[in-house]
Image (cartoon, rainbow, N blue to C red):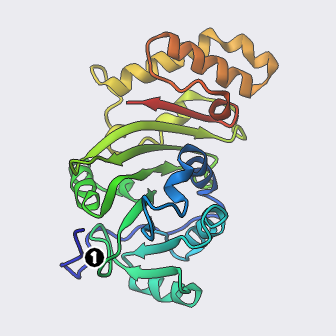
Amino acid sequence: MKKNSNKKPEGLITRGKTANNRLRRVDNFILMYEPALLSSGHLFADSLFIDLGYGFDPRTTLESAMRFRKVNPNLKILGVEIDKERVEAALPFADDKTFFRLGGFNLPLKENETVRLIRAFNVLRQYEEKDFLLAYERLMHYVLPNGLMIEGTSNPFGSIWVANLVRKTEDNNWKFEALVFSTNFHLGFDVEEFQTILPKNLIHRVIKGEPIYDFFQAWKQSAKETSPAKTFGVKQWFIACAEKLAEKGYKIDLKKKWLSKGWLIWYQ
């Protein structure tokens, strides 16, 4: 496993502001999507969950610890921040399974530490698009085969977000597994709102000739075609819209356990 040979953290300091439970739906998605990833089974043994760029205080890391340890009480969690003051402020909350360290895309791992899952939210949005793949490549080296990274952007309160779900392959590469759209329906349902919070690799590519442009055009058209479903509520409209989108040839997970909770999973 590649270690952090360069002690200077790689990356830029984020604004660092967040709200309570901003990433709750991200955590709940992972718990439903692949609970075995977080369990105490032999596949990932003592490997870490990394909360990359947790912000001005460690609340997102601590909230995740509370959720994830319901399925694995012994899960080791590492909060990583590039700002020294933020790390120092978080240290009083550390314990024998919860760590806070100074670092960036060159993760501050110790000898024999491995990684099962990285969550990087509202981190890469401030970078240039050219830096996106460089960051991904750097992080990939730390993750165990079949491990995951969920990376994306949310609105300030986490009521809607969009994320890349990528998996580490056996031959040491990232595989883009799915693009996940999430809403708790508190803001209703408007396809264009998702467009404004796309991950860095996609947000500037909603232009003719790009697959993500075609996807949004199809999604908007599907929303129009299924608008009568609004009579039965926003959730029913969201579900009907996803089903119509699948009819157009997009590989959408149509299980009600996802759609009824506001998760649209587009497999890549």
Q: What residue is at 36 percent from the left and 76 percent from the top?
A: 82
Any part of residue 42 in sight: yes
Q: Position of residue 86 (x, y in %)?
A: 47, 82
Figure quadrant of residue 212: top left
Q: Position of residue 100 (x, y in %)?
A: 46, 81
19 lies left or right of 215: right
Identified by mark 1, the residue type is: Pro
Q: What residue is at 73 percent from the left and 11 percent from the top?
A: 228
Q: Toward the viewer: 196 or 101?
A: 101
239 lies left or right of 246: right
The secondary element bearing badge 1 is classed as: loop
All told, the count of numbered labels is 1
Q: What residue is at 60 percent from the left and 69 percent from the top?
A: 65
Q: What residue is at 55 percent from the left and 70 percent from the top?
A: 61
Q: Which residue is mark 1?
A: 9
257 lies left or right of 247: right
Figure quadrant of residue 253: top right
Q: Position of residue 137 (x, y in %)?
A: 22, 55
Q: Position of residue 71 (x, y in %)?
A: 63, 61
Q: Toward the viewer: 118 or 210?
A: 118
226 to 155, vertically: above or below = above
Q: Quadrant of the N terminus?
A: bottom left
